[in-house]
Image (tube, grey):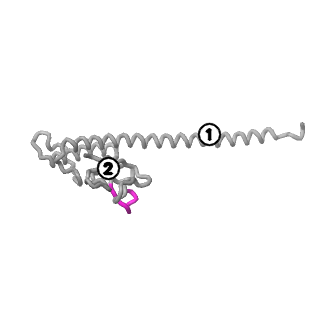
Amino acid sequence: MKYQNGVGLMEVIVAMLILGIAVLGFALLQYKSLSMGEQALRKIEAVSIARNLSDRMYFNRDGAYKGVSSTDTSKCLNTYCTADEFALKDIADVTKLAKSKNMTVAVLTCPDTKNLRNCIYIAWDETTPSQSNSDAAACTEADKFKYKSGAHCIVVEAF
């Protein structure tokens, strides 16, 4: 048995190395799980904001929502407003809500549709709520409805 001195120590070192690699793998898996959970929460918040605006657009069908932006949320509270002025207030309200969650909003014509319906774009992180074939930060392509790879956004079609 004297010729096996130190063999047990080598086995322990190899076992510790394998255990260390396994623990690092579990830590990476946990990190990825937290990251994906955060993105899922962002998508839920974005869908909620888009649904809010979609409901407002449904009830104010005569308002012009596409391509407008406003920061005045006090208008239309105590005075009569036209449909377009109410649309400005709705956009301002929803933009303020989205900004509080570090998101941006845009209402654009849905790509690749014949009925020219409006699409509500909600984007976060480095993604912009836009349609472009050349801009890597855009949410979707311009000529067809296809999310860009790695885009952090949602698109909801509004009636």
Q: Residue at position x 50%, y 40% from top?
A: 33
Q: Which residue matches tag 2?
A: 121
Q: Residue at position x 22%, y 42% from top?
A: 56
Which residue type carries mark 2? Tyr
* Between marks 1 and 2 in the image, the one whose residue lies nearer the viewer: 2
Please state the total of marks drawn on the protein image: 2
Return the mark for residue 23: 1
Residue occupying the far top of the picture: 1
Quadrant of the rendered image containing residue 14: top right
Quadrant of the rendered image containing residue 113: bottom left
Q: Residue at position x 38%, y 43% from top?
A: 43
Image x and y of residue 52, in percent: 27, 40
Q: Could you classify mark 1 by the number of other residues whose Cα lies within 10 Å: few (under 14), some (14-19), or many (20 or more)?
A: few
Q: Does the residue at mark 1 contact the one at mark 2 (Cβ under 8 Å)?
A: no
Query: Which quadrant would the N terminus be assigned to in this image?
Result: top right
- Left or right side of 47 for 34: right
Disc with the residue nearer the chain's start (1 vs 2):
1
- Front one among 109 and 123: 109
- Left or right side of 39 for 57: left
Image x and y of residue 21, in percent: 64, 43
Eyeballing the image, is 110 above or below 101? below
Which residue type carries mark 1? Val
Return the mark for residue 118: none
Image x and y of residue 85, in percent: 15, 48
Instruction: Give the residues in magenta.
Output: 130-137
Eyeballing the image, is 134 above or below 147? below
Check if residue 73 falls in the magenta segment. no
